[in-house]
Amino acid sequence: MIPRSFEYFAPRTLVEAVSLLGELGQEAKILSGGQSLIPMMKLRLATPPYIVDINRLPDLNYISELNGFLRIGALARESDFEVSPTIMSRYPILMDTTVVIADPLVRNQATACGNLAHGDPANDHPATMLALRASIIAVGPNGEREIPIDSFFTGLFTTALQPNEILKEIRVPIPPPSSGGAYMKIKRKVGDYATAGVAVQITLNGAGVCHRAGIGLTNVGFIPIKAKETEAFLTGQKLDDATIKRAAEIAAGESQPIDDIRGSAEYKRDLVRVLTTRAIILALKRANGGA
Amino acid sequence: MAKIGIKVKVNGVERAAEVEARLLLVHFLRENLRLTGTHVGCDTSHCGACTVVLDGRAIKSCSVFAAQADGREVLTVEGLEQDGKLHAIQEGFFQEHGLQCGFCTSGMLMTGYAFLKSNSNPTEDEIRHAISGNLCRCTGYVNIVKAYQYAAAKLREGGEQ
């Protein structure tokens, strides 16, 4: 399969890239890992006349903690997470997420920032970033702006990014002590999108009560879903079995799945219930210092 | 549409070409350079038959544009053998009957080549995860795993390669 012809640009600086996007207008597409875009172009589901390849921009491949935030640069590959000492030791939820994305070869190219910018509710990082209360740093002609993750996903394959903006960085507030998170995904086989996925991030207070909860749902709606009612329900609660059971039911109620080849809406809603239970239990274990 | 000038080091040799922007790396290798050891299988980024090593990382060459490889290094199956001597991963596939029809083999070899550089003593589980992006439709995975183990042992014995 051959993509439609396009004009290719490989800018060498972020300023040059942003100005190119301004000149080319909204038909231009940004190429980072390309592991969603290029297959779509081959199937001619996407036929952009201009491609702006950002892979040659300097200093955008980083995963590091600085000034209270974990910062993930636009060109950090999924496989970089798998060998990052920071991720391995402090962010098991991000490790959970990365290793269930596509397959190792795709992860060698694919980027986490692209995983968000693509705006696909089937992608995995969106739910995790919703749970972690991340924010997006976008660079445009007027400099940088910060977009809270809650308002980033605006529709199917649509985000709050403007056509002349580049997603430069994902910024995750460093979780306070006694925090833990987990991402759980059910898929039919390696490389498949989630039938359903659930990300949970919790912080406990000194008495073991849930002080804060973040919950994101994958591929059970037209956009990645932040399970706000479940988060509110968990806050201030001791996470015993009955509370976890009720939270999982609320999360299932917040999902909006449809019937498709991966299963019926009813089945997926029940998966959300089961995965929420498992993810809370694992997040709790991690918040208490366990694996 | 104007063509783009690219220079790519393929199997240690600098290759220059004028290519269309939409030319995929796999087609550049097979059609421009006639290196047909890299296969086109599913052509949808699932099967891994087109796996090559780009700057040290195993990637699917059907899902990368040739223009993206400009200024970079590509290793294909043709570049594994050195001075008439098979690479350990190739020897492993030979000794352990790691192939039946052979279609997935070049991809399996390239994934293995890159994987064993980062993990010299893998468990069976780690190998199976490493090849989870490479499909063998003969389902010859058992011997492929053995081939990786043979190569790992050989590489450990012989020092780095």
Image (cartoon, rainbow, N blue to C red):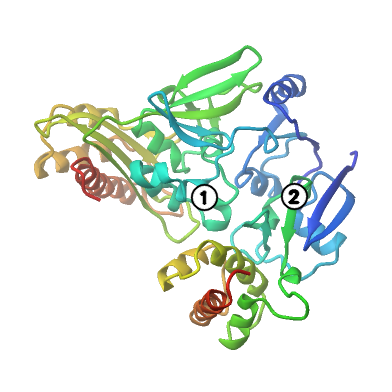
Q: Residue at x 57, y 66 (%)?
A: B134
Q: Residue at x 56, y 79 (%)?
A: B154
- Residue B32 lies, in percent from the top left, at 87, 59
The chain letter under disc 1 is A
Compared across the picture, whether A102 is left or right of A226 comes to right
Instruction: Choose mark 1 or mark 2, whichever is in front.
Output: 2
Compared across the picture, whether A30 is left or right of B116 comes to right
Compared across the picture, whether A123 is left or right of A31 comes to left
Q: Which residue is mark 1?
A: A79
So how many labels did they put on this image?
2
Quadrant where the N terminus of chain A lies? bottom right
Quadrant of residue B95 in the image? bottom right
Q: Are marks 1 and 2 on the same chain?
A: no
The chain letter under disc 2 is B
Distance, label 1 to label 2, CA atoms, is 19 Å
Q: Residue at x 77, y 63 (%)?
A: B11
Mark 2 falls on what kind of element? loop
Q: Residue at x 48, y 81 (%)?
A: B142
Three-letter code for the amino acid on which mark 1 is drawn: Ser
Q: Which residue is mark 2?
A: B72
Mark 1 falls on what kind of element? helix
- Residue A80 lies, in percent from the top left, at 51, 47
- Relative to the observer, which residue lies in front, A237 or B145? B145
Compared across the picture, whether A263 is left or right of A111 comes to left
Whether residue A258 is visible to the viewer of this picture, yes or no, is no
- Residue A108 lies, in percent from the top left, at 57, 51
Q: Which mark is residue A165?
A: none
- Residue A174 lies, in percent from the top left, at 35, 30
- Relative to the observer, which residue lies in front, B33 or B78? B78
